[in-house]
């Protein structure tokens, strides 16, 4: 409660430095250019982009003037790059708002323009305040970082909402929409979940892009909820918030929260299954096996690859001494029965159709044309996670000792077992896809759900690096952190357009800081020297 109140006070205090007249000036410039170009018969896209650029120039000019009034200001490339990143984010968002207002709600461009300009200016103002001009005192770092995290998550969620109904359906989405028009217990190439969801939301929202894509949006919320619960259980609350941020911005989960394909409901069910497997095998909650059975069954109703979670969980049980006792108890077998009952419609459909779907996805895949697809699989993972995300996922394996000894909040044995379980649930399916890619084709999105198990540790790695950076600043006064000292280190005079996530618990990266900060006598000034 105290943190939330401090966050609100910090944000409102910062916004006082941005009077309404500055935002109004930027919005006025946007509308003036937009209406002028529209009057000159320019296209809607050109009018929108040029109007947005006028607003961005106005806000950049206001920020430059404000910074120059600060005695410690020295122009740096980083501030400019941060502003460009924020402006690009605002352009994407305002473009979605314009498309939503004109294509979905049927407004003419002249009427939709004020709402579009307001959306662009609000995103730019918020981004400038939080990531460019806002600097916190020594005791306020966590408040600022929590505010940044929430802002990024909210932006990503709103970005999906504005584009849900304004972007035409992909070819694959149209194909699965046809599933919804012809309900069945299963289909030739997939289980029925995607068709059932489309039919259900279409009956509520009507036919259209929003109805088709409501399922992925709700599925992303479910997945983010279970990843938050898992991360908070295994590590702590700060890491859990960062994990949700990763779910919001990583290309793989951003896209699966927007586009309706079988992997969209799969990630929600996979996340739930992983969470309940952790509660059953690590926390030893007997009732959690019911959750395992339900989510495993729903996951297999979404896509057949969900079956890979079963061998991964069994492998952990066989190699973990404490988990082997579950082999002699009824709960895991009850979970298997529940999963099979939920999956039974697919079995019944296949039985009455000469096992067509099982043959196509099983024997058909294995006996197809030879294709060495490992390079394409690696490229798809780079695209889904980004190179930085893939390196972070790899670092999770490298930093096992630090993750298990410094980051966990529970007993050491429980923390170590949690790590081994979640890594096993990731590596076993990955190994299957790796082996398959040596002689058969791999689709772009096949590996999407398997990374959910290591998302908590990827988040822990990020917050630990931020924590280490904060330790370098621990000896500075509030005046220095506020940027009032010309001799303060460069890191204190600029903010990058990415969140530094506060973390009180561990530092994963070994070694000493490159710079050492020391006081320089009674002048109150600080200097920094290379070691």
Image (spheres, rainbow, N blue to C red):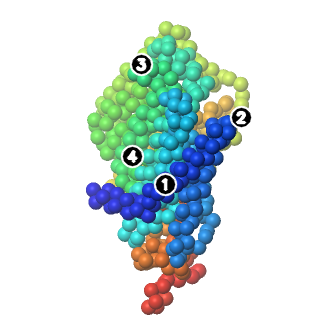
**Residue carrying label 4:** 228
Q: Are marks 1 and 2 in contact (CB under 8 Å)?
A: no
- Give the mark nearest the N terminus, 3 or 2: 3
- Of circles 4 and 2, the one toward us is 4
- Of circles 4 and 3, the one toward us is 3
Looking at this view, is 124 or 40 the one in front?
40
> Element type at marker 4?
helix
**Residue carrying label 2:** 372
- Alpha carbon distance from label 1 to label 2: 55 Å
Q: Are marks 4 and 3 in contact (CB under 8 Å)?
A: no
Q: Position of residue 487 (x, y in %)?
A: 54, 81
- Give the mark nearest the N terminus, 4 or 3: 3
> Element type at marker 1?
helix
Label 4 crowding class (10 Å Cα cut-off): few <14, some 14-19, many 20+?
A: many
Residue at 41%, 56% in the rendered image? 147
Q: Position of residue 436 (x, y in %)?
A: 63, 33
**Residue carrying label 1:** 23
Residue at 32%, 27% in the rendered image? 334
- Alpha carbon distance from label 1 to label 3: 42 Å
- Of circles 3 and 2, the one toward us is 3
- Alpha carbon distance from label 4 to label 3: 31 Å
> Element type at marker 3?
helix
**Residue carrying label 3:** 203
Label 3 crowding class (10 Å Cα cut-off): few <14, some 14-19, many 20+?
A: few
Q: Are marks 3 and 2 in contact (CB under 8 Å)?
A: no
Image height check: is 265 above or below 351?
A: below
- Of circles 1 and 2, the one toward us is 1
Residue at 47%, 14% in the rendered image? 183
| Disc sitting over residue 75 in the figure | none
Q: Residue furthest bottom?
A: 522
């Amino acid at each position: 409660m105290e943190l939330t109140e401090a966050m609100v006070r910090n944000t409102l205090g910062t916004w006082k430095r941005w009077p309404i007249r500055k935002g109004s000036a930027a919005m006025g410039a946007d509308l003036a250019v937009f209406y002028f170009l529209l009057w000159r018969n320019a296209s809607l896209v050109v009018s929108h982009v040029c109007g947005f650029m006028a607003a961005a120039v106005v806000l950049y000019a206001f920020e430059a003037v404000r910074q120059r009034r600060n005695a410690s200001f020295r122009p740096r490339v980083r501030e400019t790059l941060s502003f460009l990143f924020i402006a690009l984010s605002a352009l994407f968002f305002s473009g979605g708002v314009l498309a939503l207002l004109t294509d979905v709600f049927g407004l003419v461009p002249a009427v939709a323009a004020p709402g579009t300009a307001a959306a662009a200016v609000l995103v730019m103002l918020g981004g400038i305040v939080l990531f460019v001009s806002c600097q916190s005192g020594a005791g306020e770092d966590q408040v600022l970082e929590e505010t940044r995290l929430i802002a990024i998550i909210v932006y990503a969620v709103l970005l999906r909402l504005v584009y849900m109904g304004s972007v035409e359906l992909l070819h694959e989405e149209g194909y699965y929409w046809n599933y919804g028009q012809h309900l069945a217990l299963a289909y030739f190439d997939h289980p029925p979940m995607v068709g059932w969801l489309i039919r259900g939301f279409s009956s509520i929202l009507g036919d259209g892009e929003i109805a088709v894509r409501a399922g992925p949006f709700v599925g992303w919320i479910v997945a983010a909820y279970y990843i938050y619960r898992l991360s908070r259980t295994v590590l702590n609350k700060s890491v859990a918030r960062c994990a949700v941020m990763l779910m919001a911005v990583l290309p793989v989960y951003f896209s699966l929260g927007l586009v309706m394909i079988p992997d969209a409901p799969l990630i929600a069910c996979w996340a739930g299954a992983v969470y309940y497997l952790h509660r059953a095998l690590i926390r030893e909650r007997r009732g959690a096996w019911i959750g395992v059975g339900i989510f495993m069954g729903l996951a297999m109703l979404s896509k057949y690859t969900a079956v890979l979670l079963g061998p991964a969980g069994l492998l952990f049980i066989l190699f973990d001494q404490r988990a082997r006792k579950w082999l002699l108890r009824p709960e895991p077998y009850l979970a298997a029965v529940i999963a099979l009952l939920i999956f039974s419609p697919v079995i019944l459909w296949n039985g009455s159709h000469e096992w067509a779907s099982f043959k196509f996805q099983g024997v058909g895949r294995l006996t197809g044309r030879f294709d060495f697809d490992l390079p394409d699989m690696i490229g798809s993972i780079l695209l889904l996670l980004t190179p930085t995300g893939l390196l972070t996922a790899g670092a999770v394996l490298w930093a096992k000792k630090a993750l298990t000894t410094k980051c966990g909040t529970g007993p050491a044995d429980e923390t170590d077992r949690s790590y081994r379980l979640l890594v096993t649930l990731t590596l076993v399916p990955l190994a299957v896809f790796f082996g398959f890619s040596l002689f058969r084709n791999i689709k772009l999105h096949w590996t999407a759900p398997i990374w959910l198990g290591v998302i908590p540790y990827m988040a822990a790695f990020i917050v630990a690096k931020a924590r280490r950076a904060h330790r370098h600043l621990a000896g500075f006064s509030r005046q220095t952190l506020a940027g009032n000292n010309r001799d303060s280190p460069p890191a204190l005079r600029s903010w990058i357009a990415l969140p530094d996530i506060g973390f009180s618990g561990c530092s994963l990266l070994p070694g000493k800081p490159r710079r050492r900060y020391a006081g320089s006598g009674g002048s109150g000034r600080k200097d920094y020297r290379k070691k």
